[in-house]
Image (cartoon, grey):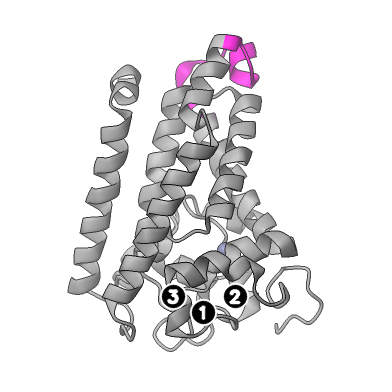
Amino acid sequence: MSELLLANEPIVRLSFFLGVLAVMAAWEVAAPRRRRDIPRLLRWTNNLAVVAVDTVLVRLAFPIVAVGMALAAERQGWGLFNIYAAPAWLAFACSVLTLDLAIYLQHVMFHAVPALWRLHRMHHADLEFDVTTGLRFHPGEILLSMAIKLAVVVALGPPAAAVLVFEVVLNATSMFNHSNVRLPQGLDRILRLIVVTPDMHRVHHSIHPSETNSNFGFNLPWWDRLLGTYRPQPREGHEAMTIGIEQFRTRRDLWLDRMLIQPLIGPASGYPINREDEDG
Ligand SMILES: [Zn+2]
C-alpha cells in the first residue's frame, strides 16, 4: 500500500487537488454559505496564480521535499522512529498527529511574530472566503513552512507514506474548511469533533483580531480545544461578519502583483497576538 502510494506520488497529489477543488467549487455554487460580492474570475485567477508561483519556487528552492526527506532519514537512520522501532501503525498515527500539531503551532507563531505575520497576513487579506482562499499563501510563508516541515521530518523520522498522506489530507481539508459552503448545523456540530469545518475556520478569517487569533487548526480541531484557542462562532454571525483584515481592502489588492509585495507594505501592527490593545 505504502509503496503504491509513493510510486504514484505526483498523480495522487494532483488528483486529490483537482478532485477536491472541483467538488468544493460545485458545492459552493449549489449551497453557498455567504453572498458573493467579488467576481469569481478576479479572485480565482489571482489565487490560483499564487499556487503556481508557490509550486515553482518550492521546486527551485529545495532539492528535496518532505516525502523525499522522510526516505532519506530512513536510509540514514535519522529521527525518532528510525532510531527506536515502533509498530508501523503506531509510527504512522503518531507521525500524522505530530505533523498536524507542528502545523498548528507554526500557524500560531505566524500570528505571534510581527515579521512572520507580514507573510501570513496575505492569506488573511482575501476579501472573501472560499475554496481558493485555502490555497492562497505567500511564497515566503510556503518556503519557510517547508523548511520547518523538513526539520520536523528529520527529528521525527516518520514513515514516508505518513508524510504523503498528511500533505494530501492537509491540502484537501484546507480547501474544504475555507470553502463557502452551507452545512446543516447538526452535521457541522458532529463533523467539527473530528475535522475543522468551514464554519469553524471562517471565524479565523474575521476582521476582529480576537476572532482572527482563534481556531488556528487546519486539519484536526482538537489542538484549539486543548490549548485554549477555540471560538465556536463569529460574534456577528457567519453571514454578516466581515472577512479579511483592516489593511488591503481594495479589489486591486487581490491582484497577484499586489499580493506578492504585501509583506513590505505598511506596518505589521494590528493582528499579532501579543499586541497590547485587544478588542476583546
Ligand atoms: Zn491565520
The residue at the point 58 percent across, 53 percent down is 140
Q: Does the stretch in magenta take in 86?
A: yes
Say which amino acid is labelled 1. Answer: Pro
Q: Position of residue 184 (x, y in %)?
A: 29, 71
The answer to whether residue 202 is left or right of residue 182 is: right
Q: Earlier in the sequence, mark 1 or mark 2?
A: 2
For the residues bearing labels 1 and 2, Cβ distance under 8 angstroms:
yes
Say which amino acid is labelled 3. Answer: Leu
The answer to whether residue 18 is left or right of residue 277 is: left
Location of mark 2 (residue): 211
Foreground: 69 or 278?
Answer: 69
Foreground: 140 or 88?
Answer: 140
Magenta segment boundaries in residue numbering: 76-94
Q: What distance separates the C-alpha of mark 1 from that of mark 2?
A: 7 Å
Q: Is mark 3 on a helix, strand or loop?
A: helix
Tell me if residue 123 can be seen: no
For the residues bearing labels 3 and 1, Cβ distance under 8 angstroms:
no
Q: Residue 234 carries which label?
A: 1
Q: In this view, which residue lies farthest toward the right?
A: 276
Say which amino acid is labelled 2. Answer: Glu
Q: Is mark 2 on a helix, strand or loop?
A: helix
**From what the image shows, is residue 175 above or below residue 40?**
above
Q: Nearer the viewer, mark 3 or mark 1?
A: 3
